[in-house]
Image (spheres, rainbow, N blue to C red):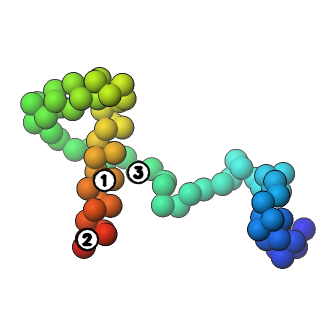
Amino acid sequence: MQAEEFDTKFDNDEDITEFLDLYQARRPSYEQKRVNIDFPVWMIEALEKEAKRLGVTSDSIIKLWLAERLDKKVITG
């Protein structure tokens, strides 16, 4: 399939998934990289309590809060 035909199908909201190799798909700005951060015990306890209240993991709440802060910083930067 030519790129123009693919683009036309996409632009016309046609299903193009059969033409994609989803096992090789990447979202570059969403790739993961592990980091280690030391937090004070009180902060870990507070994070775990809030995460439990919200029904999510501590990792999830940390990522959410960091993303919110970074989005604001980028916008107001």
Q: Is residue 3 left or right of residue 75?
A: right
Q: Characterize the local packing of mark 2: few (<14), some (14-19) or many (20 or more) Cα atoms within 10 angstroms.
A: few
Residue 29 tag number? none
For marks 1 and 2 on the same chain, the one whose residue lies earlier in the sequence: 1
Image quadrant holding the N terminus, namely bottom right
Instruction: Kindly identify the residue that appears in the image at 68 percent across and 53 percent down.
Output: 24
Name the secondary structure under disc 3.
loop
Dot 1 amino acid type: Glu
Name the secondary structure under disc 1.
helix
Q: CA distance from mark 3 to mark 2?
A: 26 Å
Q: CA distance from mark 1 to mark 2?
A: 12 Å
Which residue matches tag 1? 68
Residue 15 at x, y percent in the picture: 81, 54
- State whether residue 37 is above or below residue 75: above
Which residue matches tag 2? 76
Residue 33 tag number? 3
